[in-house]
Image: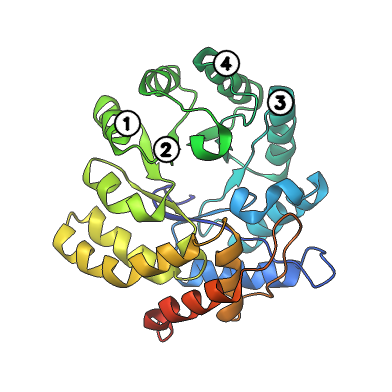
Amino acid sequence: MEPEITGVGTAMITPFRADGSLDVARLEKFIEFQIGEGVNFLVPCGTTGETPTLSEEEQCEVIKTTLRIAKGRVPVVAGCTSYDTRHVVHMGKMFKALGVTHVLSATPYYNKPTQEGLYQHFKALRQETGLAIMLYSIQGRTGVNVTPDTVERLVKDNIIFAIKEASGNILQIQEICQRMNGALKVFSGDDALVLPLMAVGGVGVVSVASNVVPRAMRQWVDTMTERNYVKAREQLRPLLPLFNALFAETNPIPVKGAAAILGLMEPNYRLPMVPPAEKTMAQLRETLKPFSKKN
């Protein structure tokens, strides 16, 4: 039986070789590292994985590899996003054929659908694939917010089982948690907001930082799950400078640089992503020091 989806899920970076091709061997080792360090679930092919630059074949390869290496030890929630509803349904069916049962799907970007359009988009994905959906709300990237009313409607109609909330609006997050009252799993989409989100009823995080400090993130979230917020504030002290460094430039530029510092993969990117500035690399080296003996 597959473990429950809760706690820390890693929004996985994607390793490339120097020639830009997918590095499957590195990916396999990275997945084992994540599982060995205690993350609760894996999220391949999210934006942090540079998915907009991956072909459908490459996305399938990343997801197949993740499922194969995970072997049911942790759940896999595959990224499945498009601004075209027909295409996201196509992707969902394709991933389901690989063995995917759960997907993370961001709101359609750029074309800014209405709340009714958002509802119908996710309804189509759910009805036509049968996949369990974690909705990803990140208006800073997509240009559209998912209101608490729409979230409640999606939950009531059994369309979504969880939400990755990255609106940055703690009042909205609090309202969603209170209105859902445990009927929806609320995850933070922002490492820096995990503590306040879990304090108001969230269950964890889909994390960028756990790519490089998975054990520390798991321990921190476990502490908050136990409602020991005094200890959690202390655990946050070394993490907060790292969070700042990981977003000193556009994600996933810094986290891939941090992974290279730790020897997890080569710092290879696909345009339009480029390597971080040396100033950012220096900041990453400094903020990773407290964790160097733990990873």
Question: Which residue does the numbered mark 2 point to in the structure image?
Answer: 167
**Residue 86 location, x and y as percent?**
73, 23
Give left or right: position of 110 versus 190.
Answer: right
Which residue lies under the disc numbered 4? 117
**168, 106: nearer the viewer:** 168
Nearest the eye: 213 or 39: 213
| SS at badge 2 | loop
Assign a secondary structure to mark 1: helix
Instruction: Write the residue at 27% across / 33% down.
Output: 171
For disc 1, the neighbor class at 10 Å (few under 14, some 14 to 19, many from 20) is some
Q: Sequence order check: which comes first, mark 2 or mark 1? A: 2
- 10 Å crowding of disc 3: few (<14), some (14-19), many (20+): few
- The residue that disc 3 covers is 84
- The Cα atoms of the two marked residues, 3 and 4, are separated by 11 Å
User: Is 220 located above or below residue 121 in the figure?
Assistant: below
Element under disc 4: helix
Of label 4 and label 1, which has the lower sequence position? Answer: 4
Q: Is residue 66 above or below residue 237?
A: above
Give the percent coordinates (x, y) of residue 252. Answer: 59, 58
Q: Residues within 10 Å of mark 2 (few under 14, many from 20)?
A: many
Q: CA distance from mark 4 to mark 1?
A: 20 Å
* Viewer can see residue 111: yes
Q: Which amino acid type corresponds to the residue marked 2 in the rendered image?
A: Ser
- Measuring 78% from the left and 71% from the top, which residue is drawn there? 17
Are circles 3 and 4 on residues that touch, CB within 8 Å?
A: no
Residue sitting at 40 percent across and 23 percent down? 147
In the rendered image, which residue does mark 1 sit on? 172
The amino acid at mark 3 is Asp
Disc nearest the viewer among 3 and 1 = 1
Could you tell me how far apart the alpha carbons at marks 3 and 1 are, in whole angstroms?
A: 27 Å
Label located before the other in sequence (3 or 2): 3
